[in-house]
Amino acid sequence: MAEKGIRWTDQQKRAIDARGSDVLVTASAGTGKTAVLSGRCVSIVSDRRICPDVRNVLVLTFTEAAAEQMRSRIAERLREAFLDRRDDHLRRQLMLLQGADISTIHSFCKRLITEHFYRLDLDPTFSVIDGDEQRLLKSEVLEKNIDWAWGQNDIRVALERLLYQRDLWTSEGFLRKITEISDFLDGIISRENWYDRAARLTQVANQRTAGLGDKQKQIIDRRIHSILDQLNHVKTLSQSGGGDSIWENKFQESHIEPVVRCAELLKAGDWDRCAEIIRNYSKPATRTPKGINESVAKLVQSMARKAVDSFAELSQLTILNPDYLDRLGDSVELQTMVLIELVRKYDELYRQAKRAVNCLDFADLEHYALRLLTSEDSSSDEPLPSQTALALRQRYKHIFVDEYQDINAVQQKILELLGSG
């Protein structure tokens, strides 16, 4: 449906009019992604065959301001469509729009929890803690956590080794890592699974041949191909600007060929020779190409240097340093195990502190919502939809997510359980 006063590009029209599948819109900032999302929403809501009721739509954003802006845009465009066509269906959709679920992800989760609190063993009068209160509470919990740790004879030696010569006094000191890891785990579906897996990986005798080693090899493979893409782009920039062919030939030989060689060896399964190239890599000088615009030349030089630095930094990874585990493995294992234990205890104390004042944080809203939507008969590895999720699938026929690239694993699983495929 074309909208009055808006001239969509061909690609925008495709995103708005596509039906029968999920649609992912990617573009740089300021190119109208949110406008396309609201345009697609209006287009679907306007079609009584696929959306008889605007309350069949769920629109999720990351901020309250974005949610209000989205509701306002949809209302404005529905109103324009109604004035243009005088369609009773559009009039009804406008009247029902206020009842449509257009909100932040966290507001949606809170609404879901409030409606089904009795299934979660929650006090329905719970409040959601704000940012300042949360920081204060976490600071108090961290102090209790360290006090607890010093009182545990079985981890005291490991704790002393973990904290030895580390910055403990500044606001960004090492102990903050406990809070940071806990915050990271807010976006993980199962904390317990993470604790157990981290502990198992730490205790593996030879990490170079275990799963952790395989993961690091995959990371190196992805980085090498990313660096190769950057270097090829640098060469293309120089060529498109009419650059010096001699510079380009030297650049190919000194910058690109070592990375290409590593990529080929990895593909052939020759890890040892690939690792040797990375360990022995000496960063080549990156000169400014001649014969092209000065600003482009500086950009080419800057991008090439960043790519070279990234390739050289690969040599710092554990798996590329055979002596690392032999020299430091036991000490690192001990320190890692006590750090995992500190995070585990911190999470326990934080849960107790929140329960004492009957509050939840944003991460709690997501995890409780996920619990509601997950069948008790399913595993954490393969969550199946609960009866609540199946009922919501009947209601929400169309789900829209603004700033989709920012969602975490928990939010993604919530969307999967709400969607019907």
Image: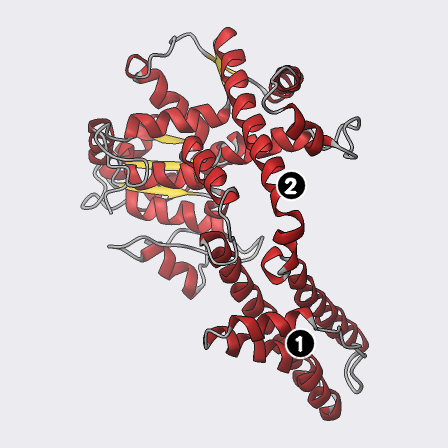
Amino acid carrying label 2: it is Ser
Q: What residue is rendered at 79% in x and 26% in y? A: 169
In terms of image quadrants, where is residue 167?
Answer: top right
Q: What residue is rendered at 61% in x and 55% in y? A: 318
Q: In this rendering, does residue 104 appear at all?
A: no
Q: In this rendering, does residue 333 appear at all?
A: yes
What is the crowding at mark 2: few (fewer than 14 residues within 10 Å), some, or many (at least 20)? few
Q: Secondary structure at mark 2?
A: helix
Q: What residue is rendered at 41% in x and 36% in y? A: 410
Amino acid carrying label 1: it is Val
Determine which residue is flagged by label 2: 331
Name the foreground residue: 96 vs 28: 28
In terms of image quadrants, where is residue 194?
Answer: top left
Determine which residue is flagged by label 1: 234
Disc with the residue nearer the chain's start (2 vs 1) = 1
Whether 391 is drawn above or below 275: the answer is: above
